[in-house]
Amino acid sequence: MSIKYGFIAVAAVALTATAAVLVQKNVNWQDILTARSLPETSQSVQESPSEAFSSELASVPDKEFSAGGESQTSGQSETEEASKTPVQTEEEWQLILVNSDHAIDQSFKPELSEVQNGYLMDKRVVGNAQRMIQDAREQGVELLVCSGYRSYESQQQHFDSSVQSLKNSGYTEAAAIASTQQLIARPGTSEHQTGLALDIVTPSYQGLDDGYAETDAAKWLLKHAAEYGFILRYPKDKEEITKISFEPWHYRYVGKQAATEIMEEGICLEEYFEK
Ligand SMILES: [Zn+2]
């Protein structure tokens, strides 16, 4: 499959049996992200250690996903500071593209900080996310984070256990992998590993299904998330491009400028890079 990214820099670096690929816009390379050769899928799948997995994590907080028990006492001052200064300037790290064709390296791990209820994300984005949550609350809308950063290893574990359980029930290795890929993103292809993605629901509706799109929280996010630099990452009418099913709860930080453009034009991140 050959997607032309126009003026976007695309580079590949061979690393042992892997190739590193990072797609960015108007910028230099910051990190080398390893892309593994991945089979193409023509079908939409749920993004990464699947959303069923994330609800499991919500009820059983994993150490990996908690901020070590420290409460975010600085949240308020960060919020105030964030409202005084514009959302961070556009920088390359915000525009990382991760999808089934662009994987990130196992070693990729951003510096993390807690955003809400033990969920972590890239610490550079936490202030924006918390300001968004605070502003929504002031307007009568409760936003509840149910997934943030997820490590490569946790995704690998989840993927492998699915493959194993299918093999135990009689699948061949190849069939077990193919079947698992329909439900769980391969390690390295989950946007959650970037630390820039959040799954956000609301206390009165925590189901990860299309019905969430009808809630006040989902509607508020659709209307306001770009003001804080976030986009709806997997829109309903872009499933063929993103190869991910509609996820009204999954928001991705890209910076205010890109977010405004993407949301106003009703495009997805892949299309933004093609412009
Ligand atoms: Zn998600």
Image (tube, rainbow, N blue to C red):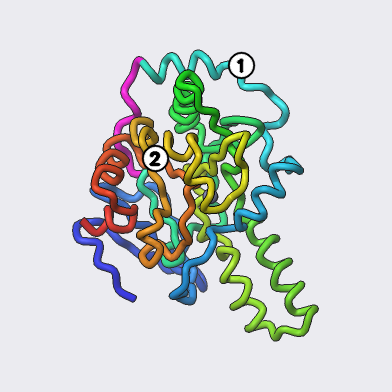
- Nearer-the-camera pick, 271 or 204: 204
User: Any atom of ligand 1 within 8 Å of the CB at mark 2?
Assistant: no
Does residue 120 appear to the left or right of 83 in the view shown?
A: right
Q: Is residue 91 magenta?
A: yes
Q: Which amino acid, by three-letter code, is at mark 2? A: Leu
In percent of width and height, residue 205 lies at: 60, 40
Q: Which mark is residue 73?
A: 1
Q: Who comes first in sequence, dot 2 or dot 1?
A: 1
- Nearer-the-camera pick, 204 or 81: 204
Q: Which residue is mark 2?
A: 222
| Magenta segment main secondary structure | loop
Q: Quadrant of residue 99?
A: bottom left
Q: Secondary structure at mark 2?
A: helix
Residue at screen point 30% across, 31% down: 89
Q: Quadrant of residue 200?
A: top right
Start-end of magenta stretch: 84-93
Please say if 107 is above or below 263: below
Instruction: Count residues near mark 1 (Cα–Cα under 10 Å), then give few for <14, some for 14-19, many for 20+.
Output: few
Q: CA distance from mark 2 to mark 1?
A: 28 Å
Q: Which amino acid, by three-letter code, is at mark 1? A: Thr
Q: Which mark is residue 267?
A: none
Residue at screen point 28% across, 49% down: 266
